[in-house]
Image (cartoon, rainbow, N blue to C red):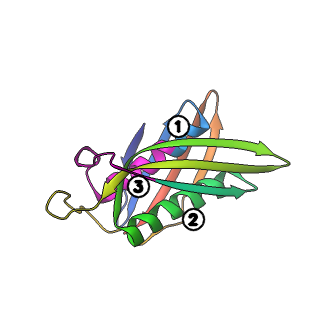
Amino acid sequence: MFRYLEHTADVLYEVEASSLEELFADAGKALSNTMIELDSVKKTGEYEIKLENESIEGLLHDFLDNELILIQTDLVAFNDFKVSILEKNKKFFLQAKCFGEKIDKAKHEIKTDIKAVTWEYFKAWKEKNKWKCKVLLDV
């Protein structure tokens, strides 16, 4: 589950999830939803992201960065993600399938353009039995 928070110039959102994989998927949905209404996107295509990082925060930032690069270079919109994360030898490994379709300006209204996933306010943490993150997008 994601929710947008108030911010003066950019887009700030927070995600709360019951698993790490769900956290990444919902953070990806929030990024996509910032640009295009998720309900207007069909799952006609599939893209894959594979990453590794020594920290969960670094892995999440890299994942969102790679999603944004796919959106901007391949002109696709995503509305769902299937994420797998493994920890091995003090590193985290991510495999994600991103589901969506090519952006069609007649069908998809572009709400805003995202310049970057920033490190400002960025954090991911576990609190009790929930995973949480906060993300600021430069728009």
Q: Which amino acid does label 2 sit on?
A: Trp
User: Outermost residue toward the top?
Assistant: 129
Residue drawn at x 70%, y 56% as measured from the top left: 52
Q: In this view, does 115 lie to the left or right of 22?
A: left
Contact between labelled residues 3 and 2, with CB atoms less than 8 Å apart:
no
The numbered mark at residue 125 is: none
Determine the CA span between mark 2 and mark 1: 21 Å
Q: Give the magenta range.
A: 25-46
Secondary structure at badge 3 equals helix
In the image, residue 91 lies in the stretch drawn in magenta: no
Q: Which of marks 2 and 1 is in front?
A: 1
Q: Is residue 124 left or right of residue 32?
A: right
Residue located beneath label 2 in the image: 119
Q: What residue type is labelled 3?
A: Leu
Residue located beneath label 3 in the image: 31
Instruction: Mark 2 or mark 1: name the one nearer the start of the chain.
Output: 1
Spot occupied by residue 3 in the image (x, y as percentages of width and height): 38, 43
In the image, residue 40 lies in the stretch drawn in magenta: yes
Secondary structure at badge 2 equals loop
Q: Is residue 99 above or below residue 68?
A: above
Residue located beneath label 1 in the image: 22
Instruction: Mark 1 or mark 3: name the one nearer the start of the chain.
Output: 1
Quarter of the image with the N terminus is top left
Instruction: Mark 2 or mark 3: name the one nearer the start of the chain.
Output: 3
Quarter of the image with the C terminus is bottom left
